[in-house]
Amino acid sequence: MDSSLIGIGIALGISFFILYTRKKKWMTEKIVWLICIGLLAFGLFGFLYSESEFRSDRIMYFGFCVPIIYWISDRIFKRISENIHQRDFILFLRYSDEINDGFGAKNPQVKGSDKLFSFGLLTIIVVTLLIGIGTIK
């Protein structure tokens, strides 16, 4: 198995897991910060101290750094939404517990900024990973 697939899986898997569970009672901010900082420390340690000359290993270590970028962006979007709507933004994505995603469902509580923030977080996760993969030599 290529080690870069592990990093890509961690980057996408952990980021999407945190995205979809961010309002669960058991998923507190402290837990997410600990997860993200732990992954960042592991990724930076591997990236800086490994003597690997393989591109796939560097991509793997970069993948461990992506969730903290997502989480910081999520917190920024939450703060902006709290200033605009006095509430955290509603995750407007399929299979989210925050909306009705049935056929022909209406979600009048969802504002345009909620859709923008949801799409923005998806974009940040994927683009950060793609930029990292593209720039690592």
Image (tube, helix red, strand yellow):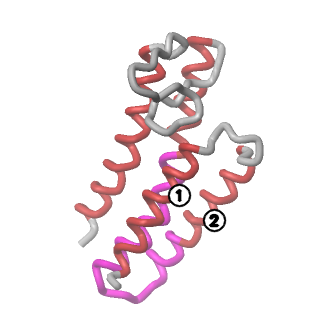
Upstream in the sequence, badge 2 or badge 1? 1
Residue that badge 1 annotates = 14
Say what secondary structure mark 2 lies in. helix
Main secondary-structure element of the magenta-colored stretch: helix
Front residue of 95/49: it is 95
Quadrant in the rendering for residue 71: top right
30 left or right of 101? right
- Label 2 and label 1: CA atoms lie apart by 12 Å
Depicted 46 relative to depicted 31: above or below: below
Front residue of 31/134: it is 31
Quadrant in the rendering for residue 50: bottom left
Where residue 77 appears, as percent x and y from the top left, is: 52, 29
42 left or right of 129? right
Residues at discs 2 and 1 in contact (Cβ within 8 Å): no
Depicted 105 relative to depicted 4: above or below: above
Label 2: how many residues lie within 10 Å, few (<14), some (14-19) or many (20+)?
Answer: some
Where residue 63 appears, as percent x and y from the top left, is: 43, 65
Residue that badge 2 annotates = 38
Total numbered labels: 2
Quarter the N terminus occupies: bottom left
Q: Residue at x 53, y 58 (%)?
A: 14
Where residue 123 appears, as percent x and y from the top left, is: 35, 41
The magenta segment is 43-70
Q: Residue at x 28, y 56 (%)?
A: 130
The three-letter amino acid code for the residue at tag 2 is Gly
